[in-house]
């Protein structure tokens, strides 16, 4: 079964050509490799890669780079199965797999179904957003099966050229750790602690990002349209609201990219790290509230301490991208139309559910083998139809997440039933 869609024709790649569970074998020569990976990662703004051997099919590399990755998926995952970032060419220049030299192995944090990340990215591609390709990897380390992972294409120079054209080398920013796009002045310094520059590190000129944020907050829509792909931004927002993906720009204010295309000098927004889509990150809301998340949702303003004055307007409106676009009646109508088109097309409940069931059947044997996974196999089986409600762990059981996790099928169907009347013509 093919992907739900694709942003533009891409070269067929063996890692992502059809649904598959690729067997990847990693080999460390150091006995204390796990502790060294931890030391290379924790507390470091720029984590250090460690050498490892790499095998996949007929491809063998003696020296690739590997490190841990993630925030909550690292700190809050019980046990050893952390996520990894792989750079094939970190120590040996030119090492690639058909043009790709970096990818992530993500540990399905908080997703007992093992489908959220892959299907979300397929939806993003289906509506024309740049999106990493995703498959699965059964990872072994020094001969021990380490678990089932999502295999996620890296967002790097190869990704940029494949989506935007050969020789595209514009600036790429990541909205982490808190990229809310609020205006914080006309100098770069305040933004360097809230966003990450992902390429062109030798050029420390952040003026294009500062100009974008200034224009978004302080100028009219006409000026904004000259430096931002507004159509893509509306799709970007529509996707996260439809899927209730709140560990994102619309919710927690991060987990997305901004790329400034050289072809038209405009920024385009696209998502990242959607493992908690379909109501799996709740911002303090109950599952029924998430199913009925408003079309124009924005997090509430922070509560001031007793006796303190109310927060200033900038803090009361912490998501200027969504709020500015939604405030314009014509753009708000386009935004609703994009949600309607998804519900009638690739995000129709029957289509989504069939796709998820197919993937669950594919990965089931590997999930059953995975002794390091976050949830027991019984939870994998019930995650499609039943809500997971946290409870205290029993004797010897690993700690479970404190947030409820919606059962996928009822959540998808009830979300569509709620949104349908709101986005009708």
Image (cartoon, rainbow, N blue to C red):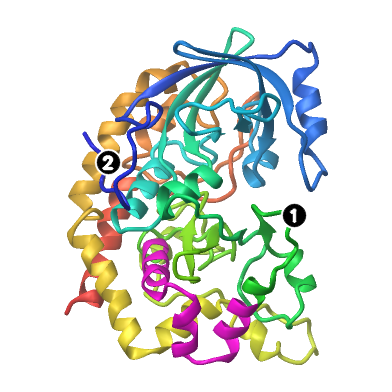
On the image, the x and y values in percent for residue 314 come to 65, 86
- Quarter of the C terminus within the rendering: bottom left
Residue 387 falls left or right of residue 284: left
Taking depth in this image into account, of 89 and 26 the one nearest to the observer is 89
Query: Does the magenta run of residues contain 212?
Result: yes
Residue 301 occupies quadrant: bottom right
Taking depth in this image into account, of 335 and 413 the one nearest to the observer is 335
On the image, the x and y values in percent for residue 228 come to 47, 75
Pointer 2 residue: 3
- Residue 49's disc is none
Is 74 located above or below residue 22 in the figure?
below
Disc 2 crowd rating (10 Å Cα; few below 14, some 14-19, many 20+) is many
Query: Does the magenta run of residues contain 298?
Result: no
Residue 124 falls left or right of residue 347: right
Identify which residue is drawn at 38% across, 49% down. 120
Q: Is residue 177 visible?
A: no
Identify which residue is drawn at 42% across, 62% down. 240
Residue 33 occupies quadrant: top right
Chain-order first, disc 1 or disc 2? 2
Taking depth in this image into account, of 411 and 137 the one nearest to the observer is 137
Pointer 1 residue: 202
Q: What secondary structure is the magenta-colored segment mainly?
A: helix
Identify which residue is drawn at 23% across, 53% down. 346
Residue 382 falls left or right of residue 221: left
Q: Nearer the viewer, mark 1 or mark 2?
A: 1
Taking depth in this image into account, of 289 and 301 the one nearest to the observer is 301
Is 65 located above or below residue 284 in the figure?
above
Q: What residue range appears in magenta?
A: 211-240
């Amino acid at each position: 079964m093919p992907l739900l869609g694709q942003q533009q024709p891409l070269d067929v790649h063996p890692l992502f050509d059809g649904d598959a569970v690729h067997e990847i074998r990693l080999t460390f020569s150091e006995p204390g490799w796990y502790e060294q990976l931890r030391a290379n990662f924790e507390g470091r703004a720029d984590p250090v890669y460690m050498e490892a051997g790499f095998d996949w099919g007929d491809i063998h590399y003696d020296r690739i780079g590997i490190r841990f990755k993630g925030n909550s998926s690292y700190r809050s995952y019980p046990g050893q199965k952390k996520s990894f970032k792989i750079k094939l060419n970190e120590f040996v220049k030119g090492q690639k797999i058909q043009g790709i030299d970096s990818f992530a192995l993500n540990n399905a944090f908080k997703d007992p179904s093992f489908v959220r990340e892959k299907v979300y990215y397929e939806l993003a591609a289906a509506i024309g957003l740049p999106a990493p390709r995703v498959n699965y990897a059964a990872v072994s380390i020094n001969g021990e099966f380490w678990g089932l992972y999502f295999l996620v294409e890296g967002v790097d120079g190869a990704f940029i050229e494949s989506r935007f054209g050969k020789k595209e080398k514009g600036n790429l920013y990541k909205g982490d750790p808190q990229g809310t796009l609020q205006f914080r002045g006309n100098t770069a310094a305040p933004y360097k602690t809230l966003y990450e520059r992902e390429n062109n590190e030798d050029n420390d000129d952040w003026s294009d990002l500062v100009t974008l944020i200034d224009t978004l907050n302080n100028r009219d829509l006409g000026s904004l349209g000259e430096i931002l792909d507004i159509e893509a931004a509306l799709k970007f927002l529509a996707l996260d609201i439809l899927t209730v993906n709140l560990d994102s720009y619309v919710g927690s204010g991060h987990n997305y990219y901004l790329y400034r295309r050289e072809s038209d000098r405009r920024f385009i927004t696209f998502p990242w790290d959607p493992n908690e889509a379909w109501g799996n990150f709740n911002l303090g809301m109950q599952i029924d509230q998430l199913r009925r998340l408003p079309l124009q949702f924005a997090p509430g303003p922070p509560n001031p301490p007793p006796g303190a004055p109310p927060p200033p307007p900038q803090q009361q409106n912490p998501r200027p991208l969504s709020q500015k676009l939604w405030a314009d009646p014509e753009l708000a109508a386009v935004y609703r139309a994009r949600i309607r088109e998804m519900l009638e097309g690739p995000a129709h409940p029957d289509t989504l559910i069939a796709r998820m069931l197919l993937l669950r059947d594919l990965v089931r044997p590997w999930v059953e083998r995975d002794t390091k996974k976050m949830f027991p196999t019984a939870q994998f089986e019930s995650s499609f139809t039943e809500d997971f409600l946290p409870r205290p762990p029993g004797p010897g059981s690993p700690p479970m997440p404190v947030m409820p996790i919606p059962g996928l099928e009822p959540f998808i169907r009830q979300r569509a039933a709620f949104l349908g009347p709101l986005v009708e013509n």
